[in-house]
Image (cartoon, rainbow, N blue to C red):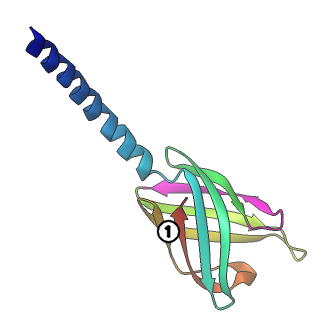
Amino acid sequence: MMWRRAITVAAGVLATAVFLVPVSAQAQTGAAGEWEMKLTTQTGVTTWQARFEQEADQLGGEIDLGDNEVLAVTGTVEGAMLKFVITVPDLDGDQPINFEGELDGDTITGAEGKFSWYGRGAWTAMRK
């Protein structure tokens, strides 16, 4: 009788583990969370803090440029590809900055682009 109870407990633990693994793996594959972004351009390396929110294929959140300047993110997610824009206020008119990148676990590798007055270059992001 003791061995039946041990088998029942072991089966319960195994069943719980099987159901928990896919949920944890799925949570890590999305873009939602806290990120550190680095733009590498001819003007040097610029580091920003980002918080992405993802609901289905919609991407939102905000990017903190420092100096109390936090900008809204709007974009989309298609598979591992992210596309989003932030709009930087400027005296000569708002400057939209477009980003494209590929999500791979805790890393986003961004495509080359033009980042307004920050210059041309590439960007990366690491999940915090």
Quarter holding the N terminus is top left
Left or right of residue 121: residue 8: left
Q: Residue furthest front?
A: 2
Question: Measuring 15% from the left and 18% from the top, which residue is drawn there?
Answer: 6
Quarter holding the C terminus is bottom right
Question: Measuring 48% from the left and 66% from the top, which residue is drawn there?
Answer: 108
Left or right of residue 5: residue 54: right
The number of callouts visible is 1
For this rendering, which residue is in front, 10 or 120? 10
Span highlighted in magenta in the image: 65-78
Q: Residue furthest bottom?
A: 42
Residue 36 position, x and y percent, is 60, 65
What amino acid does circle 1 point to? Answer: Gly
For this rendering, which residue is in front, 13 or 15? 13
Residue 98 position, x and y percent, is 63, 70
Q: Residue furthest top?
A: 1
Q: Is residue 54 magenta?
A: no
> Circle 1 is placed at which residue position?
101
Residue 119 position, x and y percent, is 68, 86
Residue 89 position, x and y percent, is 83, 68
Left or right of residue 12: residue 46: right
